[in-house]
Image (cartoon, rainbow, N blue to C red):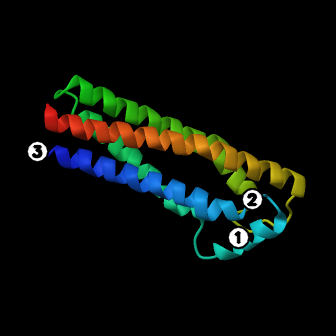
Amino acid sequence: MNKRIILWTNLTIWYFLFVGMVFDMIIIAANWRTGDLESVKNLRAFFHVTEPGDYFMIKLAVLVFAIISPIAYWRTSKAIRNLLLIALVVTLADITFTMLHFLPINEYVGWYGEKTELDPVKLKEMCQSWWNYNFLRIALDFVGLLVSGRALHKSYSS
């Protein structure tokens, strides 16, 4: 019973990550997805205290629980263990994808410091790439959410 708290926490963190990703896509990224200089400058001005990447510290919490959960349930049920291992693989894929594709774009756009020189053509391409590939990242997070929920459900039936 006490181990089930780990699964509940795991699922809750996945939920916050997924909802935050959808919110980011619908509300925030929609304002700059065209990649025009003015919209990017406005968004940079909006994020003068924090940056969009601060929210994604939740990914680290997801990673921590994606590691803890299969360890805690390693000997209880093969089905639960397999679901939690899928969630771990999804987490690692999501973080790798974020580091390799999204962080370079975010650095170019200038979330992580003052960047004044932006090539309009390159900016438009990068913003469009960010927007298009973010659907894949949201899909990965949805898979992680589903398998984590399924693992929790199986913990009640096993």
Reading the image, the residue beneath label 3 is 1
Q: Pick whichever of labels 1 and 3 is earlier in the sequence.
A: 3
Vertically, is 23 above or below 151?
below
**How far is mark 2 from mark 1, CA to CA?**
9 Å
Q: Which quadrant would residue 7 be assigned to in this image?
A: top left
Q: Amino acid at mark 2?
A: Val
Reading the image, the residue beneath label 2 is 109
Q: Is residue 136 left or right of residue 108?
A: left
Quadrant showing the N terminus: top left
Q: 110 and 125: which one is in front? A: 125
Image point (50%, 39%), residue name: 140
Q: Is residue 97 left or right of residue 79?
A: right
Vertically, is 49 above or below 53?
below
Reading the image, the residue beneath label 1 is 44
**How far is mark 2 from mark 3, CA to CA?**
47 Å
Label 2 sits on a secondary structure element that is helix
* Tags 2 and 1 touching, CB below 8 Å: yes
**How far is mark 1 from mark 3, CA to CA?**
46 Å
Q: Pick whichever of labels 2 and 1 is earlier in the sequence.
A: 1
